[in-house]
Amino acid sequence: GWIDSLLAIGISDEYSQLSINLAFKYLYMLTKVRGQKYVVRLLPHEVADIERVLSLLESDKSEIWHAKYILLLWLSILVLIPFDLKRLDGDEAAGFSVRRMLNIATSKLEGSDKSSEAASLVVAKRL
């Protein structure tokens, strides 16, 4: 659907920064109109998306608050996947992905924008 199309633009390196920012802004507007619970259900929730979302949250793509908000909402649904996250890390770094998620989410809690709400969802659902 069109949410997948907007997400594809938002996470792609092929588009201009303006296009990426607008994609995240439109996704945010959808959450305002339809509600975040409705939009979160439509976001992809595959195990392969976890690393991508974490990397995007750590990158400069998440500097605008619309992007941070949508990526954190996406992460809030990804943490509910019934999958042992330790399998992502391997034996030598067991628990790294969980710590990484919580570190990212707690660092975004300090903000005064809407993304701190989404960060609190990630922390609450992960705990």
Image: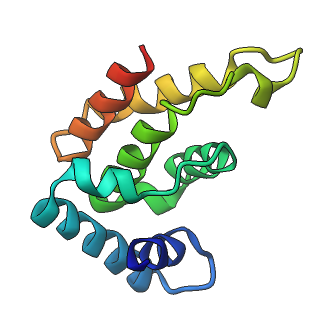
Name the residue at the left extreme.
Answer: 33
Q: Residue at x 53, y 29 (%)?
A: 101
Residue at x 21%, y 37% (from the top left corner): 117
Please state if 95 lies on the left or on the right of 73 as rendered: right
Whether residue 37 sits left or right of residue 54 in the image: it is: left
User: Where on the picture, by quarter, is residue 35?
Assistant: bottom left
Residue 102 vertical placement versus 68 (above, below): above
Q: Nearer the viewer, residue 87 or 94?
A: 87
The x and y percentages for residue 21 are: 36, 75
Which residue is at 30% across, 68% downward?
27
Q: Nearer the viewer, residue 106 or 1?
A: 1
Task: Please say if 54 is above or below 23.
Answer: above
Measured as percent of width and height from the top left, residue 109 is found at 28, 30
Quadrant in which the N terminus is drawn: bottom left
Q: Position of residue 123 (x, y in %)?
A: 37, 23
Q: Is residue 101 left or right of residue 93?
A: left
Q: How is the image coloured?
A: rainbow
87, 66: nearer the viewer: 87
Q: Quadrant of the C terminus?
A: top left
Count the marks: 0
Q: Name which residue lies at 16% across and 40% down.
A: 112
Q: Is residue 6 above or below residue 76?
A: below
- The x and y percentages for residue 74 are 43, 48
